[in-house]
Image (cartoon, rainbow, N blue to C red):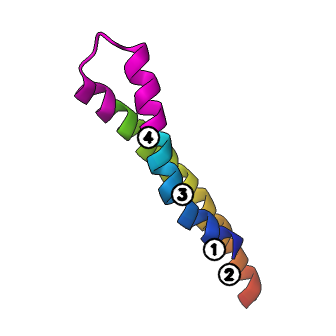
Amino acid sequence: MVPVAMLVLLVPFFFASWLIEYQVSRRMMRGLEAGVVKNAVLRANLASYALLALVVMGALAVRIYQHVY
């Protein structure tokens, strides 16, 4: 159940992380347009959270495999 809970919680954490990182990045990079910063932060978060999801799904697959066999 823990890997499933982790997968579910990745969704709200993704959006919270995106919002917070966007606000911080926007303040740090005032010379760039807001859309450019927003897209860069979105892409970075998509990449990192996709990797996190893959790790969790791998752990879930191992647990399912161990339970079956």
Q: For the magenta stretch, what is the residue range? A: 19-39
Q: Is residue 40 left or right of residue 57?
A: left
Q: Quadrant of the N terminus?
A: bottom right
Q: Residue at x 39, y 33 (%)?
A: 41
The picture places residue 63, in percent across and down from the top left corner, at: 72, 76
Residue 18 position by quadrant: top left
Q: Is residue 31 above or below residue 6?
A: above
Which amino acid type corresponds to the residue marked 3 in the rendered image?
A: Leu
Q: CA distance from mark 2 to mark 4?
A: 31 Å
The label on residue 64 is 2
Q: Secondary structure under badge 1?
A: helix
Check disc 4 and report the residue beneath it: 18
Q: Secondary structure under badge 4?
A: helix
Q: Secondary structure under badge 3?
A: helix
Which numbered disc flags the more N-terminal residue, 3 or 2?
3
Which numbered disc flags the more N-terminal residue, 2 or 4?
4
Q: Secondary structure under badge 2?
A: helix
